[in-house]
Image (tube, rainbow, N blue to C red):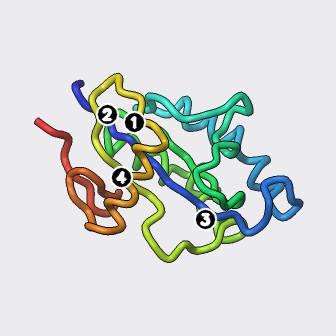
Amino acid sequence: MTHHLAQFNVGRLLAPIDHPDTAEFVAGLDPINALADGAPGFVWRLQTESGNATEVQVSDDPYLIVNLSVWESVDALRDYVFGADHAAYLRRRREWFSRLGEAHLVLWWIDAGHVPTVEESLERLERLRTEGPSPDAFTLARPFDAPA
């Protein structure tokens, strides 16, 4: 396999990460991340010493959190995202996150072994927002094949 799929998404919490309103979201992070780590096709995910990426700051907005991961294929990511356990968690996102009103998830192909950076991820998300889906920045709804 010469390419892997990078996945990046951002979300704006409705309350601070340590607020009681986000407690159930925070409590679910370890089990959901463990589910990803053990999923077929999972390669890597961004995490700090806490075991997740909620401490990674990408803007002055302390409510904005990110998720960055690498997968073997679109199908592997799709199977994880829409699998029963993660999908149940995903269905509750409006309890914890506001609607951003613009693209919040971006996918792109990387060379196998490359570890994408947050800066690279933000650039891809901005490209998707300004130019729409392309082989350089796309979504699960409009995926592109890996480069030949």
Q: Residue at x 64, y 64 (%)?
A: 12
Left or right: 95 as drawn, with respect to 125: right
Check disc 2 and report its element: helix, strand or loop.
strand
From the top left corner, tell me how far across and down residue 108 is, in percent. 31, 46
Check disc 1 and report its element: helix, strand or loop.
strand
Q: Earlier in the sequence, mark 4 or mark 2?
A: 2
The residue that disc 4 covers is 124
| Count of labels in the image | 4
Image height check: is 15 above or below 120?
Answer: below
The residue that disc 1 covers is 71
Mark 3 packing: few (<14 Cα in 10 Å), some, or many (20+)? few
Q: Earlier in the sequence, mark 3 or mark 4?
A: 3
Q: Are marks 2 and 1 in contact (CB under 8 Å)?
A: yes
Mark 2 packing: few (<14 Cα in 10 Å), some, or many (20+)? many
Q: Looking at the picture, which amino acid does disc 4 mark?
A: Arg
Q: Looking at the picture, which amino acid does disc 3 mark?
A: Arg
Check disc 4 and report its element: helix, strand or loop.
helix
Q: Looking at the picture, which amino acid does disc 2 mark?
A: His
Q: Residue at x 51, y 50 (%)?
A: 83
Which disc number belongs to residue 91?
3
Check disc 3 and report its element: helix, strand or loop.
loop
Q: Are marks 3 and 1 in contact (CB under 8 Å)?
A: no
Q: Quadrant of residue 32?
A: top right
Which quadrant: the N terminus? top left
